[in-house]
Image (cartoon, rainbow, N blue to C red):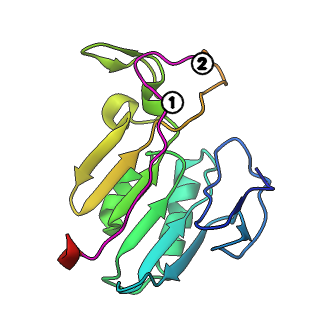
Amino acid sequence: MSEMVARTGWPCSPNTSHSVTGQDVGAGRSMPRSFSTSAILPSMRPLWLMGVTCTVGSERDAAALAKVHAEIPAGAPTILLYHTPDLMPQVVDLGIDLYLAGHTHGGQLCLPFYGALFTSSQWGKKYEGGRTQEGQTTLYVSRGLGMEGLGAPRARLLAPPELILWELRNASDA
């Protein structure tokens, strides 16, 4: 993962590799640790993108999120990239607009009419996958392309892989 480069976007570190390096973000940059940056997209006001390295230590990661968020002007549109949905209460309290996460793989092994058997999230099934709205925050937990391998079977059942393409537009264009 330390070799990962995003040519047209921003990479986000997984929770399984903490040896990522690089401070710059954006096109052609290395994977950063916790960061915030503004992006000016055509015909849009500045948009703030934040990323927090997932250490699987929620208190430490919440503190890193608060520090990164403090760099952003009040009222600016914000997006958070974080490996798990576990920071949702803090994200809602900070008023972050869009929170993009993964980690749960949509449960990876699901049953009809029940859903995920296991999510590896501190919130269990609450944020197992898909879109959730709390306050002004929209959380999307992607099933991703991979599979959990640490203690979970490397298989999928009723949780197909997904790759998401996000198109951002001005609210006035919607």
Circle 1: is it few (<14), some (14-19), or many (20+) Cα within 10 Å?
Answer: some
Q: Are marks 1 and 2 in contact (CB under 8 Å)?
A: yes
Mark nearer the N terminus (1 vs 2): 1
Q: Amino acid at mark 2?
A: Ala
Q: Amino acid at mark 1?
A: Ser
Q: Residue at x 56, y 35 (%)?
A: 145
Figure quadrant of the C terminus:
bottom left
Looking at the rendering, the stretch of residues picked out in magenta corresponds to: 154-170
* Figure quadrant of residue 157: top left
In this picture, residue 50 sits left or right of residue 115: right
Q: Residue at x 39, y 30 (%)?
A: 124
Find residue 107 and report its horizontal and vertical position in percent.
Answer: 44, 26
Label 2 sits on a secondary structure element that is: loop
Residue placed under numbered mark 1 in the picture: 120
**Which numbered tag is attached to residue 152?**
2
Q: Is residue 8 above or below residue 1?
A: below
161 or 47: nearer the eye?
161
Q: Residue at x 56, y 57 (%)?
A: 61
Find residue 24 and report its horizontal and vertical position in percent.
Answer: 70, 76
The overriding secondary structure of the stretch rendered in magenta is: loop
Find residue 7 and report its horizontal and vertical position in percent.
Answer: 66, 67
